[in-house]
Every structure is written in C-alpha cells, then in structure tokens.
Amino acid sequence: MSQVQRALPPPTSFSEAVTWVPANKRKAKNVSLVFARNKDTFSEEVKETIQKVLAPSKLNVGIRNIKKLAKGEVAIECDSAKDTEKILKEINSNTGLNNVLDAKKPTKKLHRIVMYDIEYTIPKEEVLETITSQNEELKSQDIKILFKLRSKQAGKCHWIVETQQKTFHALLRKKIIFFECQRLSLREFLRPTRCYKGNKFEHISPNCPNAESCPQCGEEGHKTADCAQAAKCINCSEANGKFNLDYDTNHTASGPCCSSLKHEIEKLISRTNYGR
Ligand SMILES: [Zn+2]
Ligand SMILES: [Zn+2]
Ligand SMILES: [Zn+2]
C-alpha cells in the first residue's frame, strides 16, 4: 500500500488554481536558475545580489523578470536564448557574483500524465504492457509508470505515468488511452509533492525534517480528527511571515485555493520544459 498516496482534491481544482495555459500553448521560456552557494541564504538575498551586481545595460540583455523560487533559488527570465546565455556566463564569471552564486539552465523534467479509473488490482507491469500494445503512440522505452492514486470509484485507481515530450503532446492531442475494452481519460498531472507529516511541500513524509503538524490548523501535537480549531494554512502563514506577503491563511494545508499551492504549481511548470 505504500505506493498509494491519499488522493488530493480532483485535478479540476488544480487547473482552476493557476492561470491556466494548456500545455500545447505554453511557450518554452528562456530561464536561468540561480542558486546561492551558501545553503542558508534566502532567495530574497539572491535576488538583491543579482540586482546590485548584474548590469543588464552593459550586457545588452533584456530581462523580463526575476522570480524567487525555493529557498536560495531565483529564476531570471530573458527575452531570448542568446540573452540567457549571456546571463549564465556573467553570473558564473563575474567575481562579485560567482563566489556566492551559481547559475544553470533548468534541467528538463519529464512530463507526467494521469490515466483515470483503472482496476485497482491490475499490477503496474500489466498496465504498461496493456497501454503500449493498444496505443501506437506509446513505446515502452518512452514511458515509465510511476505510482497510483485512489479513485472515488470503488475498486479503481488512477495511474501516473511519465513520458517524453513528444509522447506527452501526442497523448494530450488524443485525449484518451485505449485500455482493454475501456477508453481511459487522461490529463496532464501537475501536482506538487506535499508531505502528510509536516504538510510542507517538496518532500514526502519518510524524508520529513519537520515536526508532525495538523493539516487543519497547522499546530503540532494533533491531527485533523482531533482538531477543534479554525482552518489556518501552515504554508501560507509561514510564507507571510518569511516573505512579508499577504496570503489568505483561512484554509487547510490541503485546500485547493491555497496560494502556496499555486506558487508550487507555477514552480513545477517553470521547471518542466514545454517547448515543442
Ligand atoms: Zn514533511
Ligand atoms: Zn489542528
Ligand atoms: Zn495555503
């Protein structure tokens, strides 16, 4: 059962949660990712250093925006791939920058797709075998079955698969996958990883460095079933305190309208290569 994560709210609420641009309309962005060499640095400081030292006018580059990502990480978006190259070169060679910062191109993430409502008891290997033999777009070397989520339908589950870019776009165009006598619906899977122990993003509970907290109120020492407090999102409260933001905190850590969740989804999108 360890493969099964508890199903989060239905994907529609995720697509509503972000300013949604369909995958085939998303343009590849010209982004360089900048990391602080010191792990204790906040992205705020990274951004300030870049703004202080980098001289876009001397480099003749156009910068669209500088965005704070995870701790100690910032994304610089340029107008062209050429400008991105100049930025990367400057950050990694300017002594005022390269002793504290490191810049790279984002690594291409593979695309994830969710296939809905497959019989729960069918093993992973059989799912792979069935989908590759009935759908000519799918070659077993291009597709990896990752994990399953519970479905609301009794005896069914949703499988999450990872594919290469070309296969991903071919599947989204087709909108369904043949599976025995069924036609499975599919959708892009953009769900940030959230830990069920401490309720924070970007890791799962076996790797959790945080104290166990209540998804309802964010306090330690109890879980939702024993919680009598009003909803207060631990992630949005923390973001407000750390970055001086004004996120609404009046929801649970798993709420579909959570601003921290939206931020995580945008991070996922910016790290995935949607270029065609
Ligand atoms: Zn955790
Ligand atoms: Zn609570
Ligand atoms: Zn929140």
Image (tube, grey):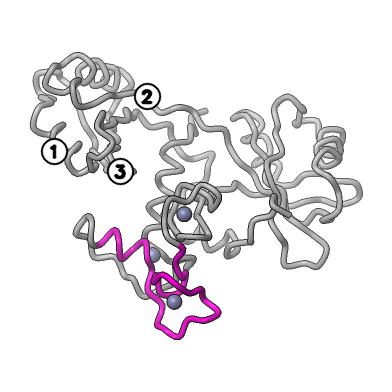
Measured from the top left, where is residue 198 in percent x and y? 45, 60
The image quarter containing residue 270 is: top left
Bounds of the magenta span? 212-240
Mark 2 and mark 3: Cα distance apart in space: 17 Å
Measured from the top left, where is residue 143 in percent x and y? 70, 32
Residue 148 vs residue 119: left or right? left
Secondary structure state at the residue bearing disc 1: helix
Mark 3 nearby-residue class (10 Å; few <14, some 14–19, many ≥20): some
**The magenta stretch spans residue 33:** no
The image quarter containing residue 142 is: top right
Mark 1 nearby-residue class (10 Å; few <14, some 14–19, many ≥20): few
- In the rendered image, the vertical position of residue 157 relative to residue 274, given as above or below: below
Q: Mark 2 is on which residue type? A: Lys
Measured from the top left, where is residue 176 in percent x and y? 74, 47
Pick out the residue farthest to the bottom: 228
Residue that mark 1 sits on: 48
Instruction: Between residue 161 and residue 2, name the one nearer to us.
Output: 2
Q: Earlier in the sequence, mark 1 or mark 2?
A: 1
Instruction: Between residue 57 and residue 68, name the one nearer to us.
Output: 68
Which image quarter has ligand 3? bottom left
Residue that mark 2 sits on: 105
Q: Earlier in the sequence, mark 1 or mark 3?
A: 1
Q: Mark 3 is on which residue type? A: Lys
The image quarter containing residue 230 is: bottom left
Mark 1 and mark 3: Cα distance apart in space: 14 Å
